[in-house]
Amino acid sequence: MEIGVGEGVEQQAAGDWMRPGRTWATRARPAGVIVTRQVSDLEDLAARGASVRFGDFDEPASLVKAFAGASRVLLISTRPPGARVQHQNAIDAAKPAGASLIAYTSIPNPVVGVNAAAIVPDHAATEEALRAAGVAWTFMRNGLYAEMQVAPAQVAVASGTFAYNSGAGATAYVSREDCAAAVAAVLACGDEHAGKAYDITRPEWFTGAQLAELYASVGGAAVAGISLDEDGFVAGAVSHGMPEEVARFLASFGRAIREGQLNQLSGDVEALTGRAPVGLRTVLAPAPAAAASY
């Protein structure tokens, strides 16, 4: 899907150029601009006609040139620590560059003290900064990525167990492709999406127990779901080699799910793109084959 732009005006995407950013970039039309710290990693996109520019959110001066000619900007959230400062630097550069709209990849229910997910404070601060920036904004509140369940599915199929700390809580996983398609649709339109927040999820919940059942079904092997509290989840993850900081970060999402703070069911993907979102089963389908060598 092409990103529509006016004559002489360029679209820009900037932020954490891991898979979410790359997925969006494959949908950008050749006239689009990509801002990244790792220009060499995006040579394939440059070869397709994208303008790949260097820009570092930790170096505000670098963003002045990177954002030159900006009109509609996709700000892809970075990771803590320091995310809210980086986001503010990007906002401060985009507005004087001429940005008329900034779309930002956030999280559902970004309320500090309510949603326990560790990334909420940075998202809440960035949303507030955009509201105060004096430029039109659209919040793309992406649910948890379906692709992030591939590795747990592989481990579960191989080991026969799936540990989780989300209790009986449920969340609706969404594919990166659907996140990319939704924001591409927003950027391709006019001003009708300004000042709106979209929950980019699927209209289908999964609890931890249901994930275990799905992993077993997709993998063709028995998988027992094991419900743990935060400390048990962290201890188990650390015992398998995960750094404790990472384990506690992941556990924060399980707590948010358990407490009902990531349970948004939404039809926004289909409303924006005109097609139903990809199902979690579809995303997981290749996982069992990979599990054999995990």
Image: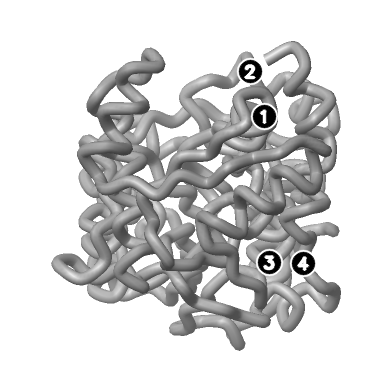
Query: Which mark lies nearer to you, 2 or 1?
Result: 1
Which is more toward the observer, 9 or 184?
Answer: 184
Amino acid on which disc 1 is placed: Gln
Residue at label 3?
Answer: 182
Amino acid on which disc 2 is placed: Asp
Amino acid on which disc 3 is placed: Ala
Crowd around label 1: few <14 · some 14–19 · many ≥20 (10 Å): many
Inspect this view and state whether residue 259 appears.
Answer: yes
Q: What element carries label 2?
A: helix
Q: In which quarter of the image is residue 9?
A: bottom right
**Among numbered discs 3 and 2, the one appearing first in the sequence:** 2
Crowd around label 2: few <14 · some 14–19 · many ≥20 (10 Å): few
Which is more toward the observer, 283 or 54?
Answer: 283
Query: Which mark lies nearer to you, 3 or 2?
Result: 3
Q: Is mark 4 on a helix, strand or loop?
A: loop
Specify the label residue 41 is tagged with. Answer: 2
Q: Quadrant of the N terminus?
A: bottom right
Residue at label 4?
Answer: 277
Tag 3 near tag 2, CB within 8 Å: no
Task: Give x and y (percent) for residue 121.
Answer: 21, 56
Query: Which mark lies nearer to you, 1 or 3?
Result: 1
Residue at label 1?
Answer: 154
